[in-house]
Image: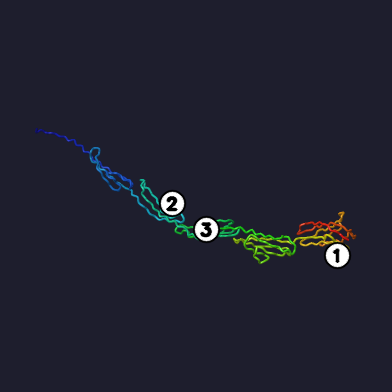
Amino acid sequence: AGCDSFIYLHLTVNDTTKKDSFLSICKYNPIIFNGISRNLSGIYRDTLINAVGCDSFVSLYLTVISPYTILSDTDACDSYTFRGNTYVNSTILRDTIFSEKGCDSIYLYKKLTIHKGLLVTDDSIKACVKTIYRGELYKKDTSFKINQSKKAFPFCDSIFQTAVVKIYPLPIARIVVTPDTLVREGTTVDVKASGGIEYKWNLTSSTSSLIEHTITNTTIFEVTVTDHNQCVSIARQVVDLSSTIDVPEVFSPNSDGTNDLLDVTKDGYIVITSFRIYNRWGQIVFESNDQNPRWDGKFKGDDQPQGSYVYQIEYLVKGKKSFKTGATTLIR
């Protein structure tokens, strides 16, 4: 109508919103942003409507943690311990190192090469009863590894040996004499050895296990016996002359030159300590300690009557006391 018209504009200006987001994710755990799956590092933007209806600008700074692989070579002597496990053969060791986000961030591949010593011929030691090997005394069978010089890679041992110690017992050497070890002079005895496969005698060059020998005095037989393990034993056996002592059963002291004296014959190692003759009443009519005693049938110078008399001999054989008692007949 031509009049002043006053218009008041009450204007409210609402600000837009801007937001920056920083996020790290694992390669194989993508996120959805702006309707799209994201698994590559970068800056992603989106426009939204804020609470007052204005544009809201969102910027996503995305970091994607991608795993990578580390390859390495490892060498060791004999064995290698990794993560609590011990390996004795060459192999590929695998390990995973996790990032702080829990991602498999590092794949570790370790090529393990185990270097072993060169095996050589076993060192075998054979002995009888006992032996000393490398400064140690052994009395029974045993075996053990010999490690020449233990060093770290790349100077691994080049020689390993198994030492085998074999201990053999000595052969049981024996000598058996037939007919006996106490024989009369001039007796031929068989001497038999046993316990081995080879025999060496002290009295003959024979290598047989059986020999013969004529006994003329005290003889010591000694044989060296060797068995199939080449172990040696020595056996000894003494053969002695038997000791005999005899008194005639009859004598006639009549001065005819035949059997006039009662004498004692002996051989071997006999030592007479006492020789007594008793008459029928137990009276000693003769006594002597001579080594060759003789009775002429008299007592105190008188001829003794015809009849039976008892004798008793005490004697020593190599220091051992013995007795012999018997009867003889005096004939006129």
Q: Up-down: is 76 above or below 217? A: above
Q: Position of residue 17 (x, y in %)?
A: 25, 41
Q: How far apart, in angstroms, are the residues tagged by discs 2 and 3?
A: 29 Å
| Amino acid at the residue labelled 1 | Thr
Give neighbour class at mark 3: few <14, some 14-19, many 20+ (Cα, 10 Å). Answer: some
Query: Of the residues tagged 2 and 3, which is closer to the observer?
Result: 3
Q: How far apart, in angstroms, are the residues tagged by discs 1 and 2?
A: 114 Å
Write down the residue under mark 1: 258
Write down the residue under mark 2: 82
Identify the residue at image location x=65%, y=64%: 208
- Looking at the image, residue 31 sits to the left or right of residue 313; the answer is left
- Looking at the image, residue 11 sits to the left or right of residue 77; the answer is left
Identify the residue at image location x=87%, y=57%: 307
The label number, if any, that marks residue 162 in the structure image: 3
- Looking at the image, residue 273 sits to the left or right of residue 74; the answer is right
The residue lying toward the viewer, choosing from 316 and 184, is 184
For numbered disc 1, what is the local secondary structure? loop
In the displayed orientation, state which residue is furthest to the bottom: 205
- Looking at the image, residue 182 sits to the left or right of residue 43; the answer is right
The residue lying toward the viewer, choosing from 190 and 14, is 190
Looking at marks 2 and 3 on the same chain, the residue that comes earlier in the sequence is marked by 2
| Amino acid at the residue labelled 2 | Phe
The residue lying toward the viewer, choosing from 329 and 41, is 329
| Count of number-bearing discs | 3
Looking at marks 1 and 3 on the same chain, the residue that comes earlier in the sequence is marked by 3
Query: Of the residues tagged 1 and 3, which is closer to the observer?
Result: 1
| Amino acid at the residue labelled 3 | Thr
Looking at marks 1 and 2 on the same chain, the residue that comes earlier in the sequence is marked by 2
For numbered disc 2, what is the local secondary structure? strand
Q: Position of residue 236 (x, y in %)?
A: 68, 61
In which quadrant is the C terminus drawn?
bottom right
